[in-house]
Image (spheres, coloured by chain):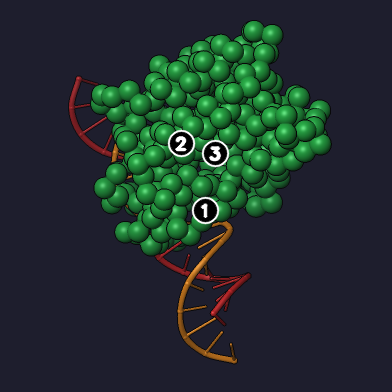
Chain colours: A green, B orange, C red
Amino acid sequence: MGLIIGLKRCGKSCRLRWLNYLRPNIKHGGFSEEEDNIICNLYISIGSRWSVIAAQLPGRTDNDIKNYWNTRLKKKLLGRRKPSSINRISSTNPDANGIEDSSSSQAFSNAALERLQLHMQLQSLQNPISFYNNPVLWPKLHPFQEKMLLQSLKESFIPLMQSAFPSPQQGDEQKVDMYGQLVDSDTRQQGHPKFSNSSVVGLKNSLNGITSSGSYIPFTSGDHAMDLTIVSRAGVVEPADAAAQPVPNFQSELENFLNSKTSGFTSQEDKIGEFGCFKEMNRYGEGMNWWSNDFETKAFLNSWDSASVLQSEGMFHDYELGYNM
DNA sequence: AAATTATGCAACCGCAATGCT
DNA sequence: CAGCATTGCGGTTGCATAATT
């Protein structure tokens, strides 16, 4: 491809410059919290499909969103790992900031893993049992991935159980949410419905199912995580189907179970799941409702034709504004 | 104040899909 | 239908600037 006369740039470069920078009504920086929510939710559900995400944010380019996610939002959500975790994850690649390590002998995608963790948090917010209640929905993981996943489960669910099944000693004055943060009783009531017996059994079955032997899916593609997301929604189990009767001993049972599943690893390995994002994530809870109730349903009914769902609304918004089409 | 390191962002690269001749 | 050009996209790089030592 030749250079544009007088510009020392090829057409492709000029096009990119136009699309990402010169185009009218392009916003630069200054992402709002609402935009953060949207980006976060979409990334969790569809992965790094920046063009699709950008279609939902008028005035934002895919490149801008991609940069924003990689440089700020991801760190905001996932960034507070303990140094030991960072060192361990990317010991062979100190420049990777604990995110990328393609040379790892485990050869798994940390991006996929982080998405999975974010996804699980989101699932817990929206419907604490839907995902975990369906063993067939769990991907077969590499043992190392499985370890990390279980660690995440452990950290996510124990506080959740404490909330759903408060022990008599805890009293009502101090309630914790799924992130271990104090919440008032009203919030807790809405956000964390108590589990039914069948749900609890299902959760345990799910946790058993994850350890099934056989070939594992190399969790290296965002599509795998996406598929996981979609099918999990197909198998949602209604939470209060058994009059929401709490199971008093389940919390300790689950804790023991998770402890047993995570035994056999070094203490250093145990730190790998210690992401700091989840405590920050809870403030996004409200903003996630639109997603689960509207977009998610449409997307599923359309067999995940994400473009058809997303592009119809905001794809040409900037052009409309800029050129009054 | 200088050197070093970290960060943010525009631009580049390669690949796949699509359109055109 | 083949060949080429264009477009769209996501991952990565390079550089300017800010922050830190």
User: Which residue occupies 55% across, 18% down?
Assistant: A200
Q: Residue A152 placed where, x, y %?
A: 49, 38
The first of marks 1 and 3 along the sequence is 1
Q: Look at the numbered disc 1 and give the secondary structure of its residue.
A: loop
Q: Look at the numbered disc 2 and give the secondary structure of its residue.
A: helix
Quadrant (top left, top right, bottom left, bottom right) of the C terminus of chain A: top right
Q: Which residue is mark 1?
A: A81
Q: Nearer the viewer, residue A217 or A308?
A: A217
Q: Are marks 1 and 3 in contact (CB under 8 Å)?
A: no
Quadrant location of residue A161? top right
Could you tell me which chain the residue with mark 1 belongs to? A
Numbered label tally: 3
Q: Which residue is mark 2?
A: A259
In the image, farthest residue toward the front: A169
Question: From mark 3 to mark 2, how far is it between C-alphas?
Answer: 11 Å
Crowding at label 3, few (<14), some or many (≥20) Cα neighbours within 10 Å?
A: many
Q: Look at the numbered disc 3 and give the secondary structure of its residue.
A: helix
User: Which residue occupies 26% across, 47% down?
Assistant: A105
